[in-house]
Image (cartoon, grey):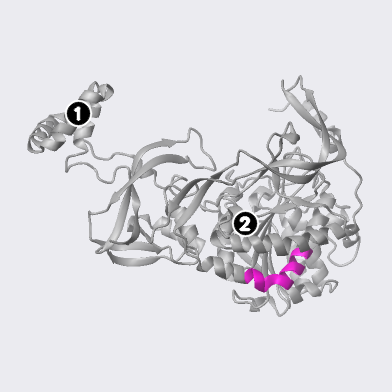
């Protein structure tokens, strides 16, 4: 319980009392704000410090549609755990009802508030959509179609407080990072536990956007850049053709637009040591649990925007508007090039898939617009801390460490076979957009393998509501049946074959297995009594000399085994026909071509 006097003291502090000092900013993009007139936003009326609550936000969405009903419409794409509607605004030049997945014009899906305290995208897009509705920006819908989700994490959005993010300058009252069940939606793109992410995936499957933008606010170190963004780089991408178009064609146009309006665009990077920035930065390669990593794996061009949390809310929102403008212009000019890259990636069928990377020991070097800092010994923390001074510092050669080292790759099967008891897995695959067949599948002339678990370790604490599991595996031919009746089959020779492989291959770190979807295979449900097993084992060893020699050798060479009666009997039990053959067996089979 917080002492009331402490709370009053905390409430009396302002951001400037404890956050690093700021350089004054007055970019050209300030002219985008209006002070009065139709559809002036709460953000503008407050001078750039307030973001509306859920009720006000949804009311503004309705006002936008009422102001431009021929081009705007609203769609309820899902409901949160608390029953709140998750809405999406659809905007097209010819009428929102006409938008299909085969639209000739590029379609952009923009998502705000997946972390509800990081809500810059909502207020920026409200301004842009207002400008479209009032006729100020008629050009936008002549270039692209827009899908806009103003708040994805609607329950977290309503856990509003002035004290949700200590290291973020505004808005004055903001939402919370996780949803009502304390789940982080931007860790849910493979396991699909949240209503919000499932809703987004259904939108993507229905409309097939050309570009997906997820707007966040970063944390960590201080630097000059106010708008940072990124995607998996081409040298570490599962869709390198797409990444190359984003790197060489779209990014330069976006950066130019931001710079012309007084913003400083920068790379999406993180400090290796938050107390000593000069040690270098980490170049992140997102795994599929994140929006941009998932998009990269499935061949959907995806940009993660991370506005700088220490820059004022007004500056960040205006920069987001300009960023979106740059995206729209770039996509209008190079949309066909991006679509060609998507087609190339979705037609590519790999034989191997990289599932895990580590950082290079040797860095690359980049120029970087940093902020001066000093280090000091803190009597509070008991260690060396950094204090940013609010003055520009340019690094000519700052070390950057990329996840260039492939630490694990897996062979891509021809197909996966899923037992009918695991229909819940199939449901999730279909939400992902993966093609699944069901039927009676013959294994004749097929090289099908089953995976056994040699050893395993469950996490000591839950992560995102799951006890994750790591394991060592071995595979052997599956010879128990020549027909799989009413099973499911997922072929990897499909546009989302790489995503299917990552989800279903147990060695992939964001697979269903790693997220704990198959915990029941770790439990024993049939047992044996020694009064029955001992005479059976004696007869079995007598009839099988090779097994007897193996048993004797293990007793001679493994003292721990020899001294453990339970281990000895377990070893023998596992070799009887009474043993549970499903125990520690991954139930999904993998086919690796014809024999």
- Magenta span includes 335: yes
Residue 360: horizontal and vertical position, in percent? 60, 41
Residue 587 spot, x, y in % from top left:
33, 51
**Residue 45 percent location from the top left of the image:** 87, 56
Q: Quadrant of residue 208?
A: bottom right
Q: In the image, residue 152 lies at what x, y percent?
A: 65, 56
Height in image: 390 above or below 292? above
Q: Closer to the camera, 389 or 447?
A: 447
Measured Cα–Cα span from mark 1 to mark 2: 53 Å
Of mark 1 and mark 2, the one earlier in the sequence is 2
Q: Is residue 23 above or below residue 344?
A: above
- Over which residues does the magenta segment extend? 325-339
Number of callouts: 2
Asked where in the image residue 595 lies, by quadrant, the reply is: bottom left
- In the picture of the structure, the residue carrying the numbered disc 2 is 234
In this figure, which residue is indicated by the disc labeled 1? 553
Residue at 80%, 45% (x, y): give it: 170
């Amino acid at each position: 319980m917080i002492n009331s006097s402490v709370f009053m003291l905390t409430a009396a502090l302002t951001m400037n009392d404890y956050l690093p000092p700021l350089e004054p900013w007055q970019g050209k993009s300030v002219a985008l704000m209006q002070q009065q007139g139709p559809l002036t936003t709460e953000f503008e009326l407050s001078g750039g410090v307030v973001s509306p609550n859920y009720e006000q936000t949804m009311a503004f969405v309705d006002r936008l549609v009422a102001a431009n009903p021929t081009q705007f419409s609203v769609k309820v794409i899902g409901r949160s755990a608390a029953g709140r509607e998750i809405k999406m605004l659809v905007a097209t030049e010819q009428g929102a009802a006409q938008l299909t997945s085969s639209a000739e014009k590029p379609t952009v899906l923009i998502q705000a508030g997946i972390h509800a305290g990081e809500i810059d995208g909502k207020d920026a897009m409200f301004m842009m959509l207002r400008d479209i509705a009032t006729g100020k920006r008629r050009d936008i819908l002549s270039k692209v179609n827009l899908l806009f989700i103003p708040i994805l994490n609607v329950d977290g959005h309503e856990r509003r407080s002035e004290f949700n993010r200590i290291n973020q300058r505004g808005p004055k009252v903001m939402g919370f990072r996780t949803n009502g069940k304390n789940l982080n939606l931007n860790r849910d793109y493979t396991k699909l536990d949240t209503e919000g992410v499932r809703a987004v995936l259904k939108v993507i499957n229905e409309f097939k956007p050309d570009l997906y933008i997820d707007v966040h606010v970063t944390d960590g170190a201080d630097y000059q850049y106010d708008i940072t963004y990124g995607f998996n780089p081409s040298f570490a991408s599962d869709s390198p053709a797409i990444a190359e178009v984003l790197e060489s064609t779209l990014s330069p146009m976006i950066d130019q637009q931001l710079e012309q309006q007084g913003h400083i665009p920068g790379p999406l990077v993180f400090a290796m040591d938050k107390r000593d920035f000069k040690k270098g930065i980490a170049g992140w390669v997102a795994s599929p649990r994140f929006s941009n990593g998932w998009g990269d794996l499935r061949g959907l061009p995806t940009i993660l925007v991370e506005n700088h949390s220490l820059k004022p809310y007004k500056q960040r929102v205006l920069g987001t508007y300009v960023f979106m403008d740059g995206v729209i212009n770039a996509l209008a000019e190079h949309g066909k090039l991006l679509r060609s890259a998507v087609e190339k990636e979705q037609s590519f069928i790999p034989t191997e898939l990289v599932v895990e990377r580590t950082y290079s020991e040797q860095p690359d070097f980049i120029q970087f617009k940093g902020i001066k800092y000093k280090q000091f010994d803190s009597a509070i923390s008991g260690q060396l801390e950094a204090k940013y001074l609010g003055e520009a510092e340019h690094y000519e050669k700052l070390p950057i460490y990329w996840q260039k080292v492939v630490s694990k790759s897996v062979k891509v099967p021809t197909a996966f076979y899923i037992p009918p008891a695991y229909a819940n897995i199939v449901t999730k695959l279909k939400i992902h957009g993966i093609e699944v067949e069901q039927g009676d599948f013959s294994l004749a002339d097929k090289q099908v393998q089953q995976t056994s678990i040699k050893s395993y370790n469950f996490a000591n604490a839950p992560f995102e509501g799951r006890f994750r599991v790591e394991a060592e595996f071995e595979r052997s031919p599956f010879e128990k049946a020549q027909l799989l009746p009413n099973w499911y089959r997922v072929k990897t020779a499909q546009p989302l074959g790489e995503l299917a492989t990552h989800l279903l291959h147990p060695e992939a770190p964001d697979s269903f297995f790693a997220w704990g979807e198959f915990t029941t295979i770790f439990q024993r449900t049939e047992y044996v009594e020694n009064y029955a097993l001992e005479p059976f084992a004696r007869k079995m060893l007598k009839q099988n000399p090779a097994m007897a020699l193996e048993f004797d050798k293990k007793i001679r060479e493994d003292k721990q085994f020899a001294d453990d009666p339970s281990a000895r009997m377990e070893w023998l039990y596992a070799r009887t026909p009474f043993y549970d053959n499903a125990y520690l067996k991954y139930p999904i089979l993998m086919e690796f071509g014809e024999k």
